[in-house]
Amino acid sequence: MLATGNRLRASADFSNTVRSGVRNGRRNVVLYAALTDPDEPTKVGFIVAKSVGNAVARNLVKRRLREAAAATVNAHPQGLNIVVRALPVSAGAQWQQLLQDYQNACRKVLDRLAAGG
């Protein structure tokens, strides 16, 4: 489970990450990542709009993405802000599809950040 200290909550942090971060899109998610202060913990935020579905569907997608993000935080414990935007098709996605899309997008974004953006 994603710890409370690793959740992105401030609107300004979301905006900065989306505007200045590296982006990668997959079938179910679009992932944005930006480097932050190396002393700060990695933080992950989620954007799951009403277009994804009703409250039950949105919360299911958020819970699944939160679980997928916990592994990223363990692998990269400091210096990143990540925003995950769920696309409408993610409501019908199986757990494995959602996890694979998240992991592939995360890997691609981290590679681009390591290469200098």
Image (tube, helix red, strand yellow):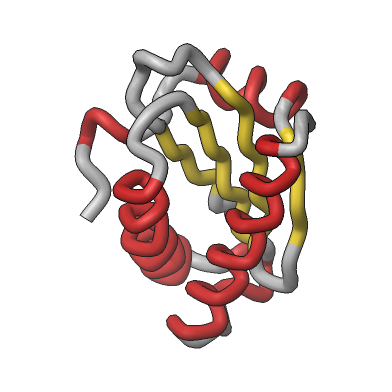
User: Which quarter of the image is occupied by the C terminus?
Assistant: top right
Residue 109 drawn at (x, y percent)? 68, 47
**In the rendered image of this protein, does residue 83 appear above or below residue 29?**
above
Task: Give residue 16's position: percent from left, percent from top.
Answer: 65, 18
Total labels drawn: 0
The N terminus lies in which quarter of the figure? Answer: bottom left
What residue is drawn where x is 63% and y is 66%?
Answer: 104
> Picture coordinates of residue 98 (x, y %)?
53, 74
Q: Is residue 55 visible?
A: no
- Residue name at image x 65 percent, y 59 percent: 105
**Front residue of this view, candidates 62 and 95:** 95
User: What residue is drawn where x is 44% and y is 82%?
Assistant: 95
In the rendered structure, the answer to whether residue 32 lies left or right of residue 60 reads right
Q: Residue at x 32, y 62 (%)?
A: 67
Q: Please say whether residue 71 is visible from this viewpoint.
A: yes
For residue 63, which quarter of the picture?
Answer: bottom left
- Relative to 112, is 100 on the left or the right? left
Q: Quadrant of residue 17?
A: top right
Q: Is residue 38 above or below residue 109?
A: above
